[in-house]
C-alpha cells in the first residue's frame, strides 16, 4: 500500500483502520494520536500533477495541496502552486494544475505536498478532525513546466524582488543604470500618455513606464505592457 511506502510527518506513523461510524454517521472513538496522512505524486504532463492521498482523519476535511520547486529559501519569490482540496474518502485522488500558478514554473524537481490544518481544515467538514494535530506529507515529482531552466526563473524572481523593494514612483531615469541591473531593455511606445515610453526588461519580465520629459520612472509593471 502507498501508506507503507511513504514517510508521514508530524510524528505520525501509518494510518490505522478507517474510523468506524455510528448509524448517525458520526465518527466513533477517534484518537488524535493515530491521525496520519500520506501522499504520492505523479506528473501527468508538463503541468498537471496527480495526487494519491491516504489518511486516517475523520472525513470529510479540507487540505492544502501544493506543488513547489524544491530547494527554495524562505526569502525567495515562491515558485509553485497551491489549491484547497476536499478529502472525502480515506483513499482519494485529485489533480493539481500548475499552469494556474502566478509565476510560470520552470523545468525542475518539485515537491508535491498535502497539508492539514485542523483550525480550518475541519471547519467545513467533520468537526472531530479538529482534535487532530497539523499533518504534512510530501512526495517528489519532476515537471517540465514552461521548459525554462531554474536559473533563469530564479534570476527573474531576484530582479523582480529588487524592483519591488527599491523602485518607487517618479524615480530618476537612466537607461544605462537600469540595464546594468536588470539586463537589456526593449523600448516601445506607451499608451499611458504621449509623454511616456515603455521599457520592457525581458530578464525581469517587467516594464518601466518612463516620462521622457521629466526623465522619471512613473511606475513599474509586471510583464510586457504599455501602461
Image (spheres, rainbow, N blue to C red):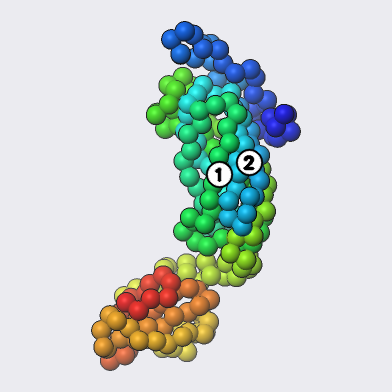
Q: Quadrant of the C terminus?
A: bottom left
Q: Tell me the crowding category of disc 1: few under 14, some 14 to 19, or many 20 or more residues within 10 angstroms, Cα based.
A: some
Can you say whether 36 is above or below 44 in the image?
above
Q: Name the residue rendered at 54%, 53% in the picture.
A: 98
Q: Is residue 11 above or below residue 27?
A: below
Task: Report the residue at 55% width, 26% height from top.
Answer: 89
Residue 189 drawn at (x, y percent): 35, 86
In-front residue for pair 178/206: 206
Residue at 44 percent of width and 80 percent of height? 200
- Horizontally, is 205 left or right of 195 in the view? right
Residue labelled with disc 1: 95
Residue 47, percent from left and from top: 58, 55
Q: Secondary structure at mark 2?
A: strand
Work out which residue is located at the far bottom of the displayed protein and give it: 213
Is the residue under label 1 in contact with that under label 2 (CB below 8 Å)?
no
Q: Is residue 214 visible?
A: no
State the separation of the CA atoms marked 2 and 1. Answer: 15 Å
Q: Position of residue 127 (x, y in %)?
A: 43, 21
Q: On residue 2, which mark appears?
A: none
Residue 25 picture location, percent across and down = 46, 13
Tag 2 residue: 138
Q: Assess disc 2: are there few (<14), some (14-19) or many (≥20) residues with their C-alpha within 10 Å of its C-alpha.
A: many
The numbered mark, 2 or 1, whose residue comes first in the sequence reads: 1
In percent of the image, x 42 and y 32: which residue is there?
Answer: 120
Amino acid at each position: 500500500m502507498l501508506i507503507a511506502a511513504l514517510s508521514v510527518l508530524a510524528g505520525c506513523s501509518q494510518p490505522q483502520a478507517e474510523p468506524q461510524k455510528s448509524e448517525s454517521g458520526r465518527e466513533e472513538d477517534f484518537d488524535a494520536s493515530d491521525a496520519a496522512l500520506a501522499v504520492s505524486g505523479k506528473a501527468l504532463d508538463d503541468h498537471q500533477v496527480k495526487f494519491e492521498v491516504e489518511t486516517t482523519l475523520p472525513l470529510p476535511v479540507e487540505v492544502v495541496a501544493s506543488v513547489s520547486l524544491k530547494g527554495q529559501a524562505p526569502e525567495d519569490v515562491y515558485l509553485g502552486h497551491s489549491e484547497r482540496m476536499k478529502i472525502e474518502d480515506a483513499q482519494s485522488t485529485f489533480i493539481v494544475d500548475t499552469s494556474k500558478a502566478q509565476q510560470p514554473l520552470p523545468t525542475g524537481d518539485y515537491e508535491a505536498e498535502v497539508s492539514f490544518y485542523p483550525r480550518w481544515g475541519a471547519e467545513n467538514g467533520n468537526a472531530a478532525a479538529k482534535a487532530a494535530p497539523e499533518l504534512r506529507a510530501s512526495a517528489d515529482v519532476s515537471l517540465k513546466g514552461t521548459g525554462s531552466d531554474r536559473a533563469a526563473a530564479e534570476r527573474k524572481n531576484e530582479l523582480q524582488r529588487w524592483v519591488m523593494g527599491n523602485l518607487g514612483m517618479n524615480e530618476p531615469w537612466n537607461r544605462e543604470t537600469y540595464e546594468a541591473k536588470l539586463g537589456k531593455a526593449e523600448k516601445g511606445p506607451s499608451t499611458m500618455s504621449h509623454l511616456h515610453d515603455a521599457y520592457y526588461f525581458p530578464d525581469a519580465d517587467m516594464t518601466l513606464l518612463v516620462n521622457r520629459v521629466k526623465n522619471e520612472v512613473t511606475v513599474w509593471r509586471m510583464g510586457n505592457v504599455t501602461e
